[in-house]
């Protein structure tokens, strides 16, 4: 079955960096685009970054542009989120996402999330 497993979260001071890997299994990793979302309690899940199947196209939320970088290693079935210059407002649970269409159905998969806390 499809599995997405995030790791790398933790407590970091403002201005610090973290790298979040998401290990994928159970599907052909090189086919779908991959996304990172984040969520804080009481708010909707927010799209942070996306990357195309080949890695040639990336998109970012305005709030993280210039600070976060999404990348993927299709040989090792892993997508990464490099987060630099972290701010307290980046504190959230970060989720890895994959989705694709099969006839008549959008299949959406989430990891369990990893907590990132930015605090001095």
Image (cartoon, grey):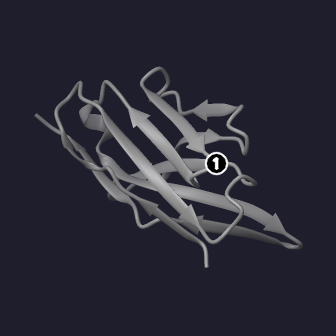
Residue that badge 1 annotates:
74
Going 80% across and 64% down the picture, which residue do you hit?
101
Q: Secondary structure at mark 1?
A: loop
Residue 86 position by quadrant: top left
Q: Is disc 1 surrounded by few (<14), some (14 to 19) or many (20+) residues within 10 Å?
A: some
Residue 51 position by quadrant: top right
Q: Would you place residue 87 above or below residue 2 in this image?
A: above
User: Which residue is at the far bottom?
Assistant: 1
Residue 44, visible in the rendered structure: no
Q: Would you place residue 88 above or below residue 77 in this image?
A: above
User: Which residue is at the far top?
Assistant: 66
User: Which residue is at the far right?
Assistant: 103
Residue 27, visible in the rendered structure: yes
Quarter of the picture containing the N terminus is bottom right
Q: Is residue 39 left or right of residue 1?
A: left
Going 29% across and 31% down the picture, which residue do you hit?
17
Q: Where residue 95 sits: x, y (%)?
A: 45, 56
- Total numbered circles: 1
User: Which residue is at the far left?
Assistant: 120
Going 48% across and 43% down the picture, which residue do you hit?
80
Question: Who is closer to the viewer here, 53 or 67?
Answer: 53
Going 10% across and 34% down the picture, which residue do you hit?
120
Question: Who is closer to the viewer here, 115 or 53?
Answer: 53
Q: Is residue 83 left or right of residue 36?
A: left
Q: Is residue 92 left or right of residue 6?
A: left
Q: Where residue 102 sits: x, y (%)?
A: 83, 70
Q: Where residue 96 sits: x, y (%)?
A: 51, 55
Q: Is residue 88 left or right of residue 32?
A: left
Q: Where residue 81 sits: x, y (%)?
A: 46, 40
């Amino acid at each position: 079955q499809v599995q997405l497993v995030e790791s790398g979260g933790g407590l970091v001071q403002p201005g610090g960096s973290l790298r979040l890997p998401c290990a994928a299994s159970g599907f052909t990793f090189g086919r779908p685009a991959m996304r990172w979302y984040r969520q804080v309690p009481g708010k909707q899940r927010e799209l942070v970054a996306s990357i195309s199947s080949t890695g040639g196209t990336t998109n970012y939320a305005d709030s993280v542009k210039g600070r976060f970088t999404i990348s993927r290693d299709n040989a090792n079935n892993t997508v990464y989120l490099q987060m630099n210059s972290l701010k307290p407002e980046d504190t959230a649970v970060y989720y890895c996402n994959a989705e694709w269409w099969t006839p008549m159905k959008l299949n959406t998969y989430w990891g369990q999330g990893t907590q990132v806390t930015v605090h001095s």
